[in-house]
Image: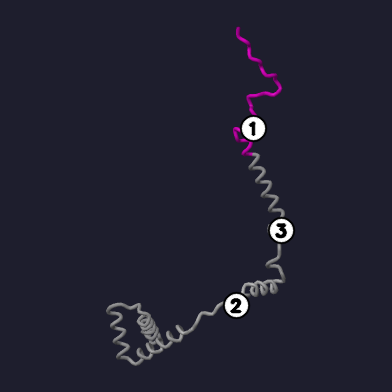
Amino acid sequence: MSEQADEDEMIVKVTDYVEGALKGADKDAVAAKIASDPTWKQTHDEMVEARKMISGLRVAKAPETFVEDVTGTIHKRSAGRFFARRTLGDRVPFGVLLVVAIIALGVIAYLMKASPTGSLKVDPQHDSTQEPTKPIPTP
């Protein structure tokens, strides 16, 4: 292995050791390396020191006006185009809306004609030019 790969492996193992992710034989092997090898010991000490420094940091809160500031910056940089009020015709071209409306009307007309209860259904057995036949009274 190359020297860089050995160093990367050492850093990974020492990091896992410091975080408590190693168990059993792996943990004992890394502890023995740290005790015997000065490079491993130095890496271990640096990681422990870094963890102490990181744990001492406090979480910073966002300012109360953060959302308004970001919104204002976006509005200023986009010259008002990003948050501008738009009608549906501005977002979707009128031609597309027209085609969708025509297709929707065609589908509705087809469904009404094909429906047994639809008002556009024409009864082929009923001829509107003939007078309806009257029932013959039975004595």
Q: Residue at x 68, y 48 (%)?
A: 101
The span picked out in magenta is 110-139
Magenta span contains residue 118: yes
Element type at mark 2: loop
Q: Looking at the magenta stretch, what is its main secondary structure?
A: loop
Please tell me which residue lies in front, 56 or 38: 56
Q: Could you tell me residue 104's position as x and y percent?
A: 65, 46
Q: Residue at x 68, y 67 (%)?
A: 82
Spatial separation of the CA atoms under disc 1 and disc 3: 38 Å
> What amino acid type should be assigned to the residue bearing mark 3?
Thr
- Give the residue at mark 2: 63
Element type at mark 1: loop
Q: Could you tell me residue 108's position as x and y percent?
A: 64, 41
Mark 3 Cα shell of 10 Å, populated few (<14), some (14-19), many (≥20)? few
Q: Could you tell me residue 27's position as x and y percent?
A: 30, 81
> What amino acid type should be assigned to the residue bearing mark 1?
Lys
Please tell me which residue lies in front, 85 or 103: 85
> What amino acid type should be assigned to the residue bearing mark 2?
Pro
Q: Could you tell me residue 65's position as x and y percent?
A: 63, 75
